[in-house]
Amino acid sequence: MPGVRLLMVTPSAKTRTDLLLGWRLALARLRGRPLILSHLITRSCNASCRTCLWRADVDETSASNLVELTTEEIAWLYREAGATGFPQLVIWGGEPLLRPDLPEVLEAACAAGLSVALITNGWLLPNRWAALRGRVQRLILSLDDVGQAHDRLRSLPGLCARLDQFVTGLKTDPLRPRLLINTVLSRLNRGALRRVAPVAKRWQAGLYFCPMETGVMLGAGFSLSKSHLALPPQELKEAAWLARELQAAGYPLLSSRRYLDLLLRDPDLHTYRCRAPYAILTVKADGSIRDCTRRDVTLAKLGDLREAGASLATLLRQPQYRAMRARANSCTACNNPDILETSWAWQLRPFMLRHALHLGIG
Ligand code: SF4
């Protein structure tokens, strides 16, 4: 654990970063403020995954003609997030590397003191990494299978080999970010976990797997647009068993024991109390703040806050924000381990805090 190691050795830069992040997470939690700003920076994508719910042509929660935030507006958002005490920023999309201003917005995030995680399909990394390195603490690569099977899922021929070459080049980089792989399980990649785990080990990357999300909460109720692609419950149980076996065999699967146990007991994942809206604030590409319990309803608009001269912290006191949090009490629409594990962390469940410390927090 970083805290224990600090007492014994001169802290390395990485240890200091972990400690600072741990301190900022603890402070945010004490103040009851969100831990993560989740920013869907763009809806554009260069891939066309059938499981995606967020790309512009499949997103049913936003207007088709939305205008993305400018560089300056994003810099304002990140400054506000830093001033409000958010410790972490997750940038995703769409494909974030399609934003030409990504180096500038990452610079703004670093200046605001945010610890940055970037989620990408990785196609553009070889071209763009030189301008991004040093500003990303966690690089999360989407990898749903290996070799050409992965390329077909993303409709990007050569993608897996390209990622392999990029990661190999990173190994000697002193500014190498913490590397994570995210694998979405569906009927399109049955058995992928067993194939991806050795790649994660070779890449020295942590591996998360998620049952695919089948739909979203709308004002009118749950919209199940992709359920035909989801694995049936029995196969999700088998994935949980396999994940345990792979962990025991030394593969770097990062799922918590509690998440795997729950997936085995209740593969539909309806027996948890969601605290994600307490811990995560999500901003969409056009600057609308998402109400996760009614994703087609805008909670607030960043532009309105700016025009009124209000801070991001103002939003956290507004009744509609509190109402969203209250609705989480009876909502278990999400099956993503991020949502469940973040909820357990927010509730300060000891097993989750131990798990976070074991993984090195960030
Ligand atoms: S499970 Fe949690 S994160 Fe998902 S829609 Fe419900 S309240 Fe929001």
Image (cartoon, rainbow, N blue to C red):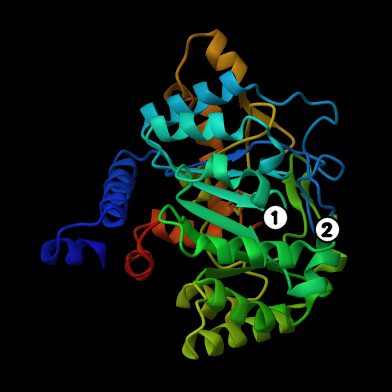
- Mark 2 crowd level (few <14, some 14–19, many ≥20, 10 Å Cα): some
Q: Is residue 161 above or below residue 284?
A: below
Q: Quadrant of residue 187?
A: bottom right
173 and 163: which one is in front? 173
- The image shows residue 90 at horizontal and vertical percentages of 54, 45
Look at mark 1 in the image and give the residue it sits on: 121
Q: Residue 193 carries which label?
A: none
> In the rendered view, does 170 fall on the left or right side of 300?
left
Report whether the residue tagged 1 is closer than 8 Å to ligand 1.
no
Q: Which residue is drawn at 52% across and 80% down?
A: 261
Residue type of the residue flagged with mark 2: Leu
> Is residue 305 at all visible to an observer of this figure?
yes
11 and 221: which one is in front? 11
Q: Quadrant of residue 41?
A: top right
- The image shows residue 180 at horizontal and vertical percentages of 54, 63
| Tag 1–tag 2 contact (CB < 8 Å) | yes
- The image shows residue 343 at horizontal and vertical percentages of 47, 56
> In the rendered view, does 187 fall on the left or right side of 257?
right
Question: Which part of the image, by quadrant, shows the N terminus?
Answer: bottom left
Q: Which residue is drawn at 72% across and 53% down?
A: 123
Q: What element carries label 2?
A: loop
- The image shows residue 264 at horizontal and vertical percentages of 60, 82
- Mark 1 crowd level (few <14, some 14–19, many ≥20, 10 Å Cα): many
> In the rendered view, does 115 fall on the left or right side of 193?
left
342 and 287: which one is in front? 287
Look at mark 2 in the image and give the residue it sits on: 156
109 and 318: which one is in front? 109
